[in-house]
Image: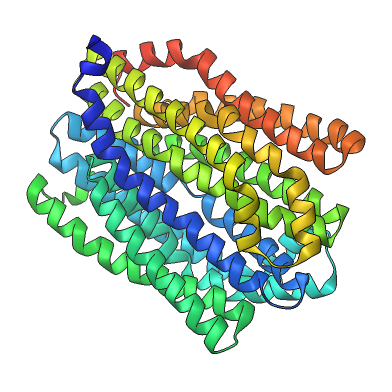
Amino acid sequence: MPPFFASPMHKEILHRAWPIILSGLSVPLLGAVDTAVIGHLPEASYLGAVAIGAMIMSFLYWGFGFLRMGTTGFVAQAAGANDGQEIRTVLAQSLLLGLLISLTIIVLQVPILKLALNLVSSNMQVEQGASTYFNYRVWGAPAVLFNYTLLGFFIGLGNTRAVLFTQIFMNVVNIALDLVFVIWLGLDIQGVALASVIAEYSAVFVGFVLVVKELRRIGGAWIKSSILSVTKAVKLLKVNLDIFIRTILLIFSFAYFTAEAAKIGEEALAATAVLMNFMHFLAFGLDGFAHAAEGLVGAAIGARKESRLKQVVLVSSFWACCVALLYSLIYGIFGVSVVNLLTNIEDVRTVAYTYLPWLVLMPLVSVWAYQLDGIFVGAMQSKEMRNGMILSALAYFIAVHFLGEIWGMHGLWAALAIFMAMRGITLGIAYPRVKRAALTSIV
C-alpha cells in the first residue's frame, strides 16, 4: 500500500470529519424542511418571504461567525501547547463578546430590519412576511452567538462528537416544532421562526453541559486577570475583525445574489430559495473536512510540528476533493427529485430545473474555497483570509454586473461559480506564505 494511504492521519481526519459532516448536513436538512413546509402552502410569496427573512438573519448572524472560527483557532493552538488556562480564557472572552454583540442586535433590531428591507427589492406581501420572520428570530441572537462559540470550542479540541450531538439535537427540535407549528397549528411564517428560536436556546443548554465536562478533563483555572487582559482581548479582536470582514463579504455576496434574483421575478426568487438548499448541503458537507483541518492544523502549529501540519493539509484535502466529486454525482442524478421534494409549485419547479446544472458544477468549483478556509482558520492567518475574500468579492460583483446583464439568471449563477473559484485561487496563492508565517509565530 502506498505510504499516503497507509498514513494513520486518514483515520484521524475521518474520525473528526464524519460527526461534523453529519451535524452539518442536518442544518441544510432543517432549511429544506423549512422550505418544504412553506413551499407547500398555496402562495409563492410565503416561500419568497422566508427566503428574504432567512437571508437577513444569515447576513446578521453568520456575519459574526468569527466567534466560531476565532475560538477554534485559538483553542486548537492552546490545546496543542497543553495550556488549559488559555483555553478557558479564550472561551470566556468569546462568550462575553457574543453576549455584547447579541444585546446590541436586539437593541438595534428596528433600524436593522428597515435597512435590510430597503436593500432588497420585493413586493409588499413578501416584505411583510420577511418582517414577521425577522421579528421572531432576532430574539434568538444570544443563543445563536453562544452556539457559535461553543462549536468553535469543541472543534478546536477535536471533540466533534459534541458538535454532532448539539447540532443534531437543535435541528431535530427545530424540525419537530416546524411540523407542529406550521402543519398542525397553522402558524406559517411565525411558526417557522419561533421553532428556530426555541431550538437555538435548547442547544445552548445542552452545549454548556458538555463544556463543563470538557473543562474538567482539560484542567486549568479561570483567571480573572487573564480573561480581562487588554492584550489578549486586542489579539482576539484583531483576528476576529479580519474574519468578520471576510464573513460579511461572503454573506453579502450570497445576499446580493438573492436580491438580484428577486429583481428578475417572484418565480426566480422562489427557485433561488429552493436551489440554495443545494449550496447549503454542499457547504456543510465540505465543512466537515475543513473543520477537521482547523483543529489539527492549529494543534500542529501549537506543538510546532511541521511534518504533521503537511500531513493534515494533504490528507484532509484529498478527502474533501473526493466528497466534492460525490456531491456532483448526487446532484446530477437526484437533483430533479430533490427540487420536487422541496416545492410542488410547477412554475417554481420549471425555473429551478433550468438552473440545476450550475449546482452540479458547483461542488467541483467550490471545494478549495472551503478546504483552504479551514486550513487558514487553524493557522490563524486571518489577514490573508480577509484579503483573499476582498479580491474574490470584487471579481464576483464585476461578474454579476456584466454576466447578469447578458444572461440573466444564468449570468448570476456563472458569477457565483467565479466567486467560489476565486476564493480557492486567492487562498491557494497565499498558502506557502501562510505556512511559513504560522510555523514561525503562534498567534
Position of residue 27 relative to residue 171, above or below, is above
- Give the number of callouts: 0
Along the horizontal axis of the image, is 107 left or right of 235? Answer: right
Q: Residue furthest right?
A: 406
Q: Image quarter for residue 168? A: bottom left
Is residue 398 visible in the rendered image? The answer is: yes
Is residue 229 visible in the rendered image? The answer is: no
Q: Position of residue 74 (x, y in %)?
A: 30, 36
Along the horizontal axis of the image, is 304 left or right of 277? Answer: left
Please tell me which residue lies in front, 258 or 108.
258
Q: Residue furthest bottom?
A: 185
Location of the C terminus (image quadrant)? top left
Along the horizontal axis of the image, is 135 left or right of 349? Answer: left
Please tell me which residue lies in front, 231 or 185.
185
Position of residue 229 relative to residue 290, above or below, is below
Q: Position of residue 359 (x, y in %)?
A: 64, 40
In percent of the image, x 73 and y 26: which residue is there?
A: 395
Q: Position of residue 94 (x, y in %)?
A: 35, 50
In percent of the image, x 62 and y 70: which residue is there?
A: 134
Location of the N terminus (image quadrant)? top left
Q: Image quarter for residue 404? A: top right
